[in-house]
Amino acid sequence: MSIIGGKIARYFGLRFLSAVLLVFAGITVLVALLDYIELMRRTADLPNVSAVLVAKTSLYRVPQVTERVLPFCVLIGAMSCYLNFSRRLELVVARAAGMSAWQFVSPALIVAFLFGVFATTVYNPISATLQERSKRFEAELFGQDASALRGGGGPFWVSQRNGDGQAIINAKSSRDQGVTLSGVTVFTFDSAGHFKQRIESRSAVLEPGVWRLLDARLYELRALPADLAEFTLKTNLTPEQVRESFATPETVPFWELPLYIKIAEHAGLVAAGYRLQFQKLLARPFFLVAMVLLAASVSLRFFRFGGVQKMVLSGVASGFLLYILQKVTEDLSKAELMHPVAAAWLPVVAGGLTGFIALLYQEDG
């Protein structure tokens, strides 16, 4: 009996994995196609645009988008898998062989957990690296025009102070983890706090001891604006110190997040965004397990009992509500109204307990 149970468990696990991978592949193709069409539309009026560069830019952005919808891929894949089992009466056969619902749900839980571990430790570093490269390709396509870049995550702000006074820097978008900025506006003040000048620049590059501002325009009191091809602004900031303000946590690979958190703390900066991203990635395997429990709680009913449409809608609705809860907790954490650990793990606990209790009630009364 244990041999038969083991074979059935492997069969259920492989069927679940194939369903999830099929859904994930379908969404990846759909996202890639839509993103490529949108990027082609935005570059239609630009001269000498390479179709290969457009395709690479679009392709490199797809992994991060699909990474965000990964929990829904698991939810939809699990629902379709168990509904297929029910339609083909395989669940009836499994129950007749003496297996409980927990026994044929357990393989999917294990596969979902391992899939989440893979997504966190392998897929996330790849998607973060490709996302950073896609920003460079976008800069080549649009000539580093910040208003044309999509998804820059801006605007960004940072303040620096040295012997000459204070400077407040604003950027519409960033690349290379904050080292390269686009759409830059700088407000400088003297040591007494009096306004000195405003500098607007197409882009800025952080170099040792200075910000190098390209295509800059200077506005000073009682003086006409002056256009400069290049302007240098002294700074005591290092690349590590500007990362918290200008680098988006989504572009930092999982394995580098602890170092970024430590650097931000040593620099006296708020590392809430990095901590939240790190906790979200740690919680991802358990979040996928929670999605499987939610899917199982609405998908194990026999087809002959009817109500399949209601089951599917209730599963999709529960996943959508869980997504809303996740976004609310993320916003609260970014506003420093909730600890990053609580913000990352609360949706996991809520979704897991909901699915577990619903499944327990259905199967064991």
Image (cartoon, rainbow, N blue to C red):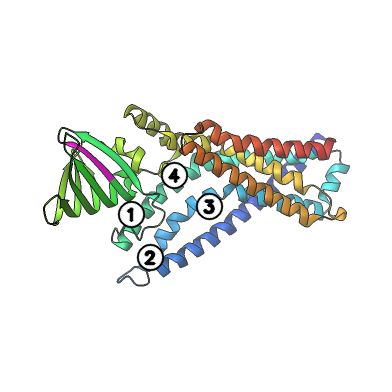
The residue that label 2 is drawn on is 52
CA gap between label 1 and label 4 equals 16 Å
Which label number is shown at residue 136?
Answer: 1
Instruction: Provide the secondary structure element on which disc 3 rests.
Output: helix
Judge whether 129 appears above or below 146 on screen.
above
Instruction: Provide the secondary structure element on which disc 1 rests.
Output: helix
The residue sitting at the left extreme is: 223
The residue that label 3 is drawn on is 66
The residue that label 4 is drawn on is 250
Q: Is residue 83 left or right of residue 134?
A: right
CA gap between label 2 and label 3 equals 22 Å
Quadrant in which the N terminus appears: top right
Image coordinates for residue 121, horizontal then vertical, percent: 50, 39
Mark 3 surroundings within 10 Å by alpha-carbon count, few (fewer than 14), some (14 through 19), many (20 or more): many
Instruction: Provide the secondary structure element on which disc 2 rests.
Output: helix
Residue range of the region highlighted in magenta in the rendering: 164-169
Image coordinates for residue 229, horizontal then vertical, percent: 15, 56
| N-term-proximal mark, 2 vs 4 | 2
| N-term-proximal mark, 1 vs 4 | 1
Q: Is residue 200 visible?
A: yes
Q: Amino acid at mark 2?
A: Val
Q: Is residue 217 left or right of residue 241?
A: left
| N-term-proximal mark, 3 vs 4 | 3
